[in-house]
Image: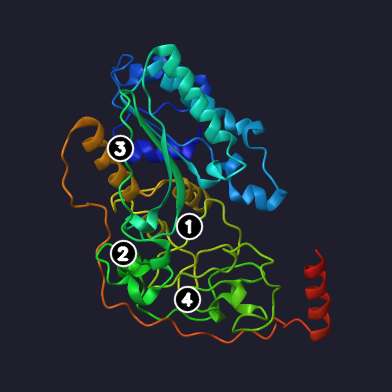
């Protein structure tokens, strides 16, 4: 339903593209594009809009509408196509907020809807879900998403074992003992300009020139009374991604689809990431070009599923549901680039960023404690 997304698909793949809202297309029309009849499709893949279930929605409003959000109607539209097309297997992808305990109406809805389809169509669709962190499978980016996978013949999907655990990811000194761990330098180190970028920062807005004073792998919390910089912000008063900078030796944080002026992650050279760098962190093949303006390009990349995750799950689906053996080699796994250079030097905080006076800080901390 987004013109730029359709243009990107047409430019990169020789696929038929139906441009418009899913409500506007019958399942018969969709199948006709693939010269298919019901039950002939191997796989139905979908990622309904995630805003109704996103963590940012809870952060902003205290809660989210979830199933009452009009955009959540795409869950029903996906299930409508599933019921009428009856593919051999299916995948649904969404933000992990879909599975929040006590806020999992969307997950329950999909399960109940699938049960109704099985009863009506005499099928045996299974329903197996898991919160997958892309970094566990070699993607150079910490990105958590829910995947729901099932098959028509009743066979349950077994998710592949993670290569890494979050406990390992929190200990940089042990990361490089794992062959398939990948960091930001592995993904984009060859795209890094070796010429030292000059101060000031290439990030605009009120806080852009503060970025060079923040170490790699840190965010605005560096400049709080609990960090190592100046006391410029209250503790945990901003989004985590505010003034967030990549570390060469760690995976990237989640690429944002709709970043603000000071919302990262930013490059360690104190600038915004380029289209190719964001695409690399999402493990897109290098021959993929994302079309559109700067903000729209980031929206497309930030909303996408890392290609390497699709490769990992695709291999498992081929083997588990179709009996097709596949190569253990992952084509989209970024190459190891060693050694990793030292962290970039820090610049002093510009004079016009004034630390919070002691009296004002006390009032601020008291207000935060009360609230």
Dot placed on the residue nearer the N-terminal end, 2 or 4 = 2
Alpha-carbon span between mark 2 and mark 4? 19 Å
Cβ atoms under marks 2 and 4 closer than 8 Å: no
Q: Which residue is mark 4?
A: 216
Residue in view at x 60 percent, y 50 percent: 55
Q: Which residue is mark 2?
A: 181
Spot occupied by residue 239 in the image (x, y as percentages of width and height): 62, 62
Give the camera-side residue of 278 and 252: 252
Residue in view at x 42 percent, y 26 percent: 18
Alpha-carbon span between mark 4 and mark 3? 37 Å
Q: Is residue 346 left or right of residue 33?
A: right
Mark 1 or mark 3: which is in front? 1
Dot placed on the residue nearer the N-terminal end, 2 or 3 = 3
Report helix, strand or loop for mark 1: loop
Dot placed on the residue nearer the N-terminal end, 1 or 3 = 3
208 lies above or below 274: below
Mark 4 or mark 3: which is in front? 4
Dot placed on the residue nearer the N-terminal end, 2 or 1 = 2
Report helix, strand or loop for mark 4: loop
Dot placed on the residue nearer the N-terminal end, 4 or 1 = 4
Q: Looking at the image, how many numbered discs can be counted on the residues? A: 4
Mark 2 or mark 1: which is in front? 2
Give the camera-side residue of 228 and 188: 228
């Amino acid at each position: 339903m987004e013109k730029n997304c359709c243009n990107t698909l047409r430019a990169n793949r020789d696929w038929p593209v139906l441009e418009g809202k899913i409500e506007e297309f019958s399942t018969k029309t969709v199948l006709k594009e693939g010269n298919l009849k019901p039950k002939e499709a191997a796989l139905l893949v979908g990622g309904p809009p995630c805003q109704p279930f996103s963590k940012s929605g809870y952060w902003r409003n205290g809660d989210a509408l979830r199933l009452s959000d009009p955009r959540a109607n795409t869950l029903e539209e996906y299930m409508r196509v599933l019921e009428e097309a009856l593919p051999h297997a299916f995948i649904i992808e969404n933000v992990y907020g879909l599975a929040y305990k006590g806020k999992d109406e969307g997950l329950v809805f999909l399960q109940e809807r699938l049960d109704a389809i099985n009863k009506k169509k005499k099928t045996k669709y299974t329903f197996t879900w898991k919160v997958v962190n892309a970094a566990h499978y070699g993607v150079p980016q910490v990105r958590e998403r829910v995947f729901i996978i099932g098959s028509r013949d009743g066979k349950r999907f077994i998710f592949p074992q993670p290569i890494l655990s979050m406990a390992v990811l929190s200990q940089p000194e042990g990361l490089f003992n794992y062959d398939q761990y990948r960091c930001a330098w592995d993904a984009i180190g060859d795209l890094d300009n070796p010429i030292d970028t000059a101060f000031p920062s290439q990030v605009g807005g009120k806080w852009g020139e503060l970025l060079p004073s923040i170490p790699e792998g840190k965010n605005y919390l560096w400049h709080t009374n609990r960090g190592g910089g100046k006391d410029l912000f209250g503790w945990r008063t901003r989004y985590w991604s505010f003034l967030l900078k990549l570390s060469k030796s760690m995976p990237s944080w989640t690429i944002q689809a709709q970043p603000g002026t000071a919302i990262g992650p930013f490059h360690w050279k104190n600038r915004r990431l380029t289209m190719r760098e964001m695409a690399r962190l999402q493990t897109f093949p290098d021959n993929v070009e994302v079309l559109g303006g700067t903000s729209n390009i980031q929206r497309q990349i930030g909303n996408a599923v890392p290609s390497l995750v699709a490769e990992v799950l695709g291999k498992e689906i081929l083997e588990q549901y179709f009996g097709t053996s596949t190569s253990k080699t992952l084509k989209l796994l970024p190459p190891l680039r060693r050694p990793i250079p030292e962290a970039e030097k820090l610049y002093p905080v510009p004079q016009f960023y004034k630390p919070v006076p002691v009296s004002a800080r006390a009032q601020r901390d008291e207000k935060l404690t009360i609230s």
